[in-house]
Each structure stands twice: as C-alpha cells, then as structure tokens.
Image (cartoon, coloured by chain):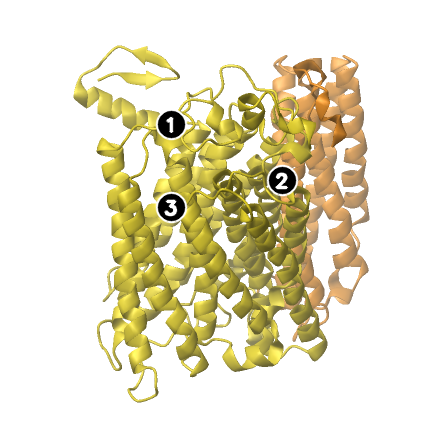
Amino acid sequence: MSTANETITADEWTLPSRGHVGMLCLILTECAFFAIFIVAHLFYLGKSLVGPYAADVLELPVVGTIFLLSSSITITLAIRALRQGHQAAFNALWLTTIIFGLIFLIGTGFEWYGLIYDQGLTIRTNLLGTTFYSLVGFHAAHVTIGLLMLTGVLIFSFAGLIHVGEAERVDVLSWYWHFVDAVWVVVLTVIYLIV
Amino acid sequence: MTVIDGGLVQPADSPKQSTWLWLHEWATTVDHKKLGLMYISSGLLFFVIAGLEASMMRIQLALPNNDFVGPETFNRLMTVHGTTMVFFVGMPVFFGFGNYLVPLMIGARDLAFPRLNAFGFWLFLFGGLLFYFSWLGGDGLYGMGTAPDVGWFAYSPLTAPAFAPGNSTDYWILGIMIAGFGSTGTALNFVATILCMRCPGMTFMKMPLFVWLMLVNGFLVLVALTPLTAAQVMLLFDRFLGSHFFDTQAGGDAVLWQHFFWVFGHPEVYILIIPAFAIASEITPVFSRKPIFGYEIMVAATVGIGFISLGVWAHHMFTVGLSSGVNTFFAASTMAIAVPTGIKIFNWLGTMWGGRIRFEMPMLWVTAFLFEFVIAGLTGVMLAVVPFDWQLSDSYFVVAHFHFVLIGGLLYNIFAGIYYWFPKATGKMLSKKWGHWHFWVFVFGFNLTFGTMHFQGLLGMPRRIYTFDPGRGWDMLNLITSIGVIFQVLGVLFFVWNVVSSLAWGEDADDDPWDGWTLEWSTTSPPPAYNFETIPTVRSRRPLWDLKHPEDPDWHHE
C-alpha cells in the first residue's frame, strides 16, 4: 500500500494476454460442464438394472489414448518451430497433430460400432449406456471441434498467413487442445479404469 | 437530423433513412455502452412482463376459491414468472451494468472481446424470445398456450416425457440454455477485461469495488452456469434420445437432478446479489462523502462469499431426506455464508457512520436495501436451521424470504444504480419528485406484499397453490398481500414515467453530477464511443478525488 507515491507510466505497465486469459476461462467453464457428467457416471456406477455391464464390454482404448496424448507433444513442438521461424516444420508437426487426433476419433468410432452392433449397448439400454455415451460423446465432440479449428489453422498456414506474429494466437488454440487431452485422462480413468 | 458516430457528425439523411440507420447502428453495434443499455432495457422489458404475470397470480390469490385463472394457467404463470425474473431480468440487467461500467471504471475503451459481447447479448435476447414463444408454439394455441408448467427448478420426474408431454418443457430447457451460452461468454469477457485491460497504475487493490465484485461474479458464472447446461443436456437426452439420467424406472435418480440444479441454483442467487452489492459499494461512499470503510475486508468477504456459495446448495433439499451428516454440513455452511455477508452490511454502515450523508435517490434506495436485506438475511439463517426448514420449506415463508433477497436486495440496487448512472448514460437527470413517488409507493407496496407473506407461511400456506379454501386464517393476509401489488405496480409506473419524461424534457446532467470519485465521471455524459481521449493513469482507489484535491491526494494515505 505504501508504494502509491510512485507514478506508473504506460510502458512499464504489463498485463496478461487476453487471449490466454479468455481461453483459461473457457477451460474453467468446460471443466464444470464435464464435472457434472463425470459425477453422473460415478454416481450410477454399477447401478444398471440390466446388462451389458462395464466390466464385460468396455476395453481400454490403448492405441487411441497413445495417439491423443502424443498429439499434445507434437502441437507443442509445432508452436516451438513456429516461434523459431521454421515454417515447414510447423506445417509438418501441425499436420501430425491433426492425424493423431483423427486416429483417436476413428478408434472411438470403431469402439462405438462394436458396442452398438456386437454388444447391443446403446444410450437407451441402461444407465451405463446413458452415462458412457454422453461423457465419451461430449469428449469426442470437443476433439472434433478442436480438429476443425486445427485444420483451419493448417489451411491458413498453407495459404501463407501464419507466421511468427501469429504464434501467440496459435498458442491460445493449443491450450484448448491440451485441455481436451487432459479431459481424456480423467474420462479414461472414470470410465475404463474404475469399473 | 444528424447521426453522431464516434464523435464525428455525419451529413443528414432523410428521416426515414436516418431511422433505418439508427436501427442498423444498434443492431450491429459492438460498443460496450450500447450493448449495456440494450441489456438493461431488454431486461426491464422482461421485468414488466414477469411483473404482470405475478400480478395475475396475486389477483387469483386475493380471494379464496377465486377463478380468475385456472390451475393449469396458474402453474404456467408461476413457472414463467420465476424463470423470467432469474434468467431474463436479473442476469441481463447486471450484465448491462457490468458492460457499461467495467471498461469505464478501469479506464479501458471496450471489453476484451467486443464481438463476443454482442453475440452474448443476442443469444440472451433470442433465448428469452424463444422461451416466451412457448405461449404460442409447442403444440399451438390449445387453450391458454403451452408455456412450461414444471416450476422454475423443473424437478424430476415431473419433466419426464410421461408427465410433461408436448414441448413446453423443451422451451424451458432451450430458452435458458441458449441464454446461458451468452451469459458464459459475457462472464468470460468480464474476467478477461478486468485481468487484462486495466489502465496503468490500477493494481488489484486499486480497482473500484464494483469491478472487484464483477470479477468474482464472472468466475461464479463460469463455474456455476455450465453445470445447469450439463443437467439440461441430460434432460434433453432423456426426453429425446431415451437415456435414463433421471428415469427412476431404469434405476435413475430423481434426486440427482435436484443436486445438479441447486449446484447451479444456489451460486446463481449470489450471481444475482453480488452485482447488487457492487452497486451499493459504489453509491454508499459517494453519498456519505467518505471512502469505503474496510476496502480490503470487502474484497475478502466477496471472495469468501464466492467460494462458500459453491458449497451450500443442499439447503434447498433438507426436506428430501438426505442423511443427517449431509444436512448438518449444509446447515453449517449456510450459516457460515452469513458471516461475510454480515461483514459487508457492517462495512456499508461503517461507511455511512460519521459521513455527511446526502439522501439523493440512489442513496435512498441503498439505505432501504440495507433494511430489507437484513430481514432477508435473518429469515435466511432461520431457514438454514434444518428442523425449522422442515416445518416451513415450500411455504409462503420461503417465498417471502427470497423475494426480500431478490427485490429488497437486488431490485432496490438496480433502481439505485439506474438513478446513479442514468445521468452518465443519457446526459439527463432523473426527476427527484417522481423519484420520491416511485420510491415511497414501491417500498410501501413491497413491504405490504412480502412482509405479510411471512405470516401466511408461518400459518401453513404452501407455495404454488392456485387457490385456497376460506377460513384457514389466510383470507385477510392474502388480500393484504394482493393489495400491496397495486402499490408496487403504481411505483413501477412512476418509475417508467420518470424515465420517459426525464429523457424527453429532463434537466441536463453535467459530467460529474454527484461529485463522484471513479473514472466514469471523468469523461463526458454520455461518454464518447472511445470513452477516454487519453487512457488515464491512476495512483489511488479514488482517481477523481486526487484530481480534485491535489493538495491532499488519496495515495498519501492508502
């Protein structure tokens, strides 16, 4: 309180970037959203009145998880490359991130196909189906939205519109992608590891 | 006619063209001041509609066995009244105040994301319109329309397709959900603006309390609103996809909905009341001619309220039959939240104590708020006592309690804020004569209606009943309650007349009519599109005091 006597001039006054703060706010509010679905899933664990039950039909999606979590590494490397001005490396790493995300989504697709057609588990079947498809589905929806935005950046980059100056904005987007990955770790834990 | 845009006077057009331009300008604006005014005026429009719905309910309940409206219509009126007041009056009006004032108070030219801000406003407005379209839409105009009738907290399993056929419940879900997306965006905007756009020198502990409280409020909206969206998504899945979240036939749990709703619902009460505190915290010092008493404690109390408010929700559910451990926890946390709230009351009193109080209209409303809000707080602590709640839950005592919070706490401060900042936003003063008529008639009517309601509640009248038999001891009390509504309606009419007549031929306001201390009073009334010619630099919590009193600036003392 006693520092009031010093006048602060505009150039020594720095505040956080609004893009990053805005993204953190979005992440906070998304966390609250997912928390409700996670609570519902945990609350209904083992309370399904009819089968199929989680222990019998759910298999740990190892491959998809490895690819999705790796994409967090590739996106970080991509932004580092962009900051250092390596445009080609950025494009390659960014494309790799998108492909990794796509592989994860395709894995989810095959998993759902098997559950629906082979095991007969749909959102209407029982409480497991209700909470499983909602939670995994909302996560997959977030991955899809992320992939659309990542693809947008890639198109801009091919059009020559992404340079070092855009690294800050691209970094904001990467925080969303990291969040999607982090949510997956939680979803993976509550759905596949706690049964 | 000239169109003034960003301080530039453009050449005149034909009258028809200029009306069109004027409309176009407001519909496409991303300016925080215009959006703020649009938020407040649409919120007040919804306020009038919801007030009319309340009046119809009170006509129905004025006499025993009345048949002014039938039970189906009564249920719809009650549901739409509650939902409107919370989602389409309380929140948008405060978003309007925040929109208008936060950038001005922190010396910024706009919010951090102006286009997101406009998007949020239009989502709110169309969410509200969609909600009201339910009277016509859904299954069409059968009888009185098909507005939702499940109550504003839409308890499960009443909302299951079997018990809520047709689409009225879906209008409730979607209207609120769409407005909720807008609210989340606006809250994000407030937080980013306050953290990233403050003018040089405005450290956290030099922000006006209004800005501090809007920051805490922004975080609360971010944390509390999406749980409701999530629960509504579950309800939609149940209704359209056949999932079983709240379907007791398939092992689902109806009480889970109550938890999810009130996890949102109780923080929501604080989302509504914290901006009211914010307005009181600006007005009290200016009209007591003293700096706010205990600034740091006020900030701490607000943050404390924000955190504790996330852990009190099950006090809405004492009658459900939760375990006594759970009941004890939520009774204790509910009593605990009264402590920071009490601190605030004492700090406002401490600000007034020994000050040279000027009872202008804003200060009158804030003073009345202190009285009403203490009553609201006391009945709140009473209801936190579990056995007392068992007796009076879902009675008119509860209705009286939360109307003292939401009218005596929230609406009084909305009025205070409008009287205080109207000159800044419009360049016109509101009339003091009509202001006094508005104030005294409304305050009298409010206490007549809702003060009386405590007694029906204590005498066992349940809420949400559409009529009652004579001779239960409620007849006279209900008549008095309904007569109070006449005075409240009159009061609001005086207010509307005051706004209209002051806008038309009111006294011009200068830039700083109240001798204020925060940055919004340093620019013109109304402010130009760019707010400040040069971005100000501040050295204390009261930059305008420093400017007006160079011989004894605040930063010598803070």
Q: Where is residue B430, by image quadrant?
A: top left
The residue under label 3 is which amino acid type?
Answer: Gly
Residue B427 image offset from top left, x and y in percent: 34, 28
SS class of the residue under badge 2? helix
Q: Where is residue A85, by image quadrant?
A: top right
User: In which quadrant is the N terminus of chain B drawn?
Assistant: top left
> Which of the two discs, 3 and 1, labels the residue nearer the N terminus?
1
Looking at the rendered structure, which numbered label has been put on residue B28? Answer: 1
**Residue in front for this viewpoint, B281 or B180:** B281
Q: Where is residue B313, by image quadrant?
A: bottom right
The reply to the same-chain question for discs 1 and 2 is no
SS class of the residue under badge 3? helix
* Residue underneath mark 3: B43
Q: Residue at x 69, y 78 (%)?
A: B323
Q: Residue at x 28, y 22 (%)?
A: B21
Marks 1 and 2 sit apart, C-alpha to C-alpha, by 25 Å
* Residue underneath mark 2: A26
* Disc 3: host chain: B
Colour in which chain A is drawn: orange
The furthest residue to the top: B11
